[in-house]
Each structure stands twice: as C-alpha cells, then as structure tokens.
Image (tube, grey):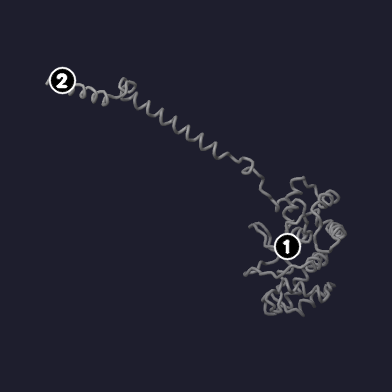
Amino acid sequence: MRAIDDGRASKYQQRQKQATPPASFAALSLEQTLIKIKEIVASSCDLLYKTSASSHPQTTTECSAPVPNWEEIENKIRKNIQCSWRDILKLCQEKDVSKIGEIPVSDFPDIAEKFHLDLSKEEISQITTKYDIKKNGKFAYYDFFQSCILLLKPQKSTLLQRVIIPKPQKPMSPGPQSMLFYSTMLRIQPQILHCWRPMKRTFKSYDESRTGLLNVADFRQVLHEYKINLSEEELFNILEYYDKTLSSKISYNDFLRAFLQ
C-alpha cells in the first residue's frame, strides 16, 4: 500500500512541475510579463520585415525615371522652329534619301545644333523617342513639323485665352495624314497667316446658311481669291483629311485653326 501511495505522490509532483510556469515568467509581475511579450512580438515583426525586404529589393532607379514632357519641350523650341522651319525641312528632305518622311535619329542632334534649338541631350533624347514612331531608329520629321507648326490636334484652352476661331460643337474626326498633306499645309502656311482674317470673312460670305461648311468648289474659289492655288492632288489630300466622310463639305474653321498657334 505504501508503495502505491509513493507512486501516486510521485505522479502528482510531476504534474505540478508541468503546470508550473517557466521560472523566467513566474518571477515577473503581470506588467513586466506584458512588456516582455511586446518585446518578443516587436522582434518577430522586425525579423519578418527584413526577410520580406531582402526577397523584394527596392527599384529606386525605375521609380525615379524622369517622365517625358514633350509638350513643354516643343513649346520651348516652337518659336525657333516657326522662324526657320523651311530651312530645317529642306535639310531633312536632303537627308531623306528614300523620300519616306523619315531621317536617322542620329541626324537630329546636328540639326538641333545648327538651327540653335537649344536642347539638352536629355531633351533631344525625349524628342527623338517621341518621333521614332515606328520604333525603327528613324525620326518622322513631318510629324514633328505638324506638331510645331500646324495645329492639327486638339489643344487645351484656358479661360483667359482669346478665341479667334470658334471650336466646333462636335469634334472633327480627321482622315488620313499623308506626306503630301503635310507638305501642302506647310507650303501654304505663310500665305494663310498673312490673310487669314479677311479669308475668314470671305468664307463666311460664301456660307449663306451659316453651317460653318463650304462645298469643295466654293472652298477652292476662296483660296484662289487669296492667290493660294492647289494642284488636284494637293486638294484631294486636304479634302481627304477634312472630309473623312466624303460629304463634299469642308469646315473652313477647322482648316484655318490648323495654322493659328
């Protein structure tokens, strides 16, 4: 019996030892225990963060890459381009041996320097990247002139900007832009700028119904009155752009707006 009692007592003592908290915590007060637990949790979180950071390295270089600001660069050089675009165009056409409206991207820095466009290497890189439209290392110079000389794309307007040509209630849906279209628009640009105000009044006098549209014959007649003569092919390319739906009508406001920056 005594052996049995001794065995029970031994098991009881073992259970008591298992239920007793570790000495390191038992000796601590409740407040100290909570502080200890917080330290352990903080240490675990710190270790987890470091592990995650090492497996996902930061890409500072990629995030801090400069965002191209083509509009700002083009505004900067627009005045110089408008003063010497004929000479720049002539040089581009000489370099364009294949007559495709493109020159090697590597030729543009020399052109920029020759005509004092005052562009940094980074700005030249951004401009040539924008006008390397086909991603073939070629600079599409007609598209470049279109952006700097002609106003064929919708522009942002401010409340203080004076409206000289009313904007259409319905935005125009332009047709194709061929090389001949660009070259024609650039060729007649000086004449249009010289007489656009009286030309606008003449357009309106032909537009008896005040729709803002003229038929092809009247449109050509007005241009002829101001000594602007177009070949059949040139007229066709202009009509193809401004009369995409083949309605035989052309918006003279849209036409004039392209020349007024």
Residue 124, how many percent across, how many down? 76, 49
User: In the figure, 243 relative to 8: above or below?
Assistant: below
Query: Which label belongs to residue 3?
Result: 2
Quarter location, residue 225: bottom right
In this rendering, the count of numbered labels is 2
Instruction: Tell me the residue at 74%/74% (across/down).
Output: 239
Local packing at callout 2 (Cα closer than 10 Å; few below 14, some 14-19, many 20+) is few
Q: CA distance from mark 1 to mark 2?
A: 109 Å
User: Badges 1 and 2: C-beta atoms under 8 Å apart?
Assistant: no
First in sequence: mark 1 or mark 2? 2
Quadrant of the image containing the N terminus: top left
Left or right of residue 164, residue 114 in this image: right
Query: Which label belongs to residue 131?
Result: none
Residue type at mark 2 is Ala
Quadrant of the image containing the C terminus: bottom right
Instruction: Tell me the residue at 79%/59% (across/down).
Output: 141
Residue type at mark 1 is Leu
User: In the figure, 52 relative to 94: above or below?
Assistant: above
Residue 100, how many percent across, how many down? 81, 63
Quarter location, residue 64: top right
Q: Nearer the viewer, residue 106 or 157?
A: 106
Residue 22, how many percent across, how many down? 32, 23
Local packing at callout 1 (Cα closer than 10 Å; few below 14, some 14-19, many 20+) is some
Quarter location, residue 102: bottom right
Q: Secondary structure at mark 2?
A: helix
- Residue pointed to by mark 1: 151
- Residue extending furthest toward the left: 1
Residue 220, how many percent across, how many down? 79, 77
Q: Secondary structure at mark 1?
A: loop
User: In the figure, 230 relative to 42: above or below?
Assistant: below
Q: Nearer the viewer, residue 221 or 99?
A: 99
